[in-house]
Amino acid sequence: MTLYTTLHLHNVPAGREPDYSAWFDGPHRAALAHLRGFHAADRYEVTPQQIMSAIPQPWRFLSVYDFDLPDPAIDVPALGPLVAAARDTGLIADDDTERLYTYHMRADWKPSPNWRPGQPFSGVSIILGNYVAGRKQEYHHWYDEVHSAEVTNVPGHVAMKRGELSHIQIEPRHYCPGDQLVLCAQQTDDLAFTVKDFSDRAGGRSPSGIAMAPRSDSGSFARTVHYFRKISGAVFWPGGVAYAGDLSLYPNKA
């Protein structure tokens, strides 16, 4: 499998939110179905609950597109005209915040024991991060063997997948502050508790008594973290398959 994930970070003009939602879950999703290697798409809105409360949250909305691509050089750019349809009709705010970043994923979702099969993700968090120069392998080992389990074992966190910024990007291109993507999924109706316990475990003060290992200094502090709640009409399942609408229509998933 050659897995790619594209993040579309953007804002929508005030009052056009219902129009964007209808476009995304209507004609846009229908057009996506014709793209080679298309796997899943979903849409999210930024939450008040954030692990790094002091950093800016310039984007209200996030769309996540997953692909298993036969030829990334051909197929990654094919998403561009579909997103441009929203831009051309004024559904994306012209405020210089829109960003499209495509990552070559290291693997698919890695679930934790917290994952509840048959339940949709309630949201995702993204880290646009970096490793310290010359310490790439150490950084990946820390995430693979230590930190991924620490993060996804926090109540409400259920799965993680990671990727590296692709050399193939979609126009319009902008500088990306994070060479490494960490995408974490949640299943929770109390995100505030999840975020607080994550912070408390990292600081060794969680009421659970669980403390995370010291953060590896192979991970750069040049990173931003953003939490979003799911708002689109389809849902993510670990494995990347999207099911739209009423879950009762999918008895093997409900």
Image (cartoon, rainbow, N blue to C red):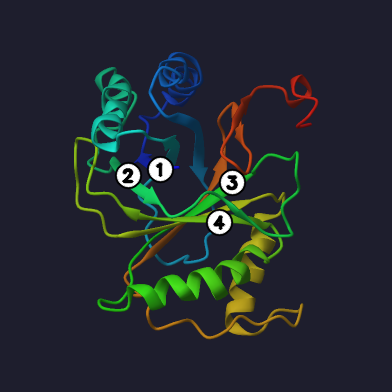
Identify which amino acid the numbered label 1 is placed on. Answer: Thr
Where disc 2 sits, the SS reads strand
In this rendered view, identify the residue nearer to me: 184 or 75.
75
Q: Residue at x 69, y 57 (%)?
A: 156
Q: Residue 246 location, x and y as percent?
A: 72, 22
Distance between mark 3 and mark 1 Cα atoms: 24 Å
Q: Nearer the viewer, mark 1 or mark 4?
A: 1
User: Left of 148 or right of it: where is 225?
Assistant: left
Q: Which mark is residue 37?
A: none
Q: Residue 253 location, x and y as percent?
A: 75, 32
In this rendered view, identify the residue nearer to me: 63 or 87.
63
Distance between mark 1 and mark 4 Cα atoms: 17 Å
Q: Nearer the viewer, mark 4 or mark 3?
A: 4
User: Dot 1: few (<14), some (14–19), or many (≥20) neighbours within 10 Å?
Assistant: some
N-terminal of the two: label 1 or label 4? Answer: 1
> Which residue is disc 2 drawn over?
102
Identify which amino acid the numbered label 3 is placed on. Answer: Gly
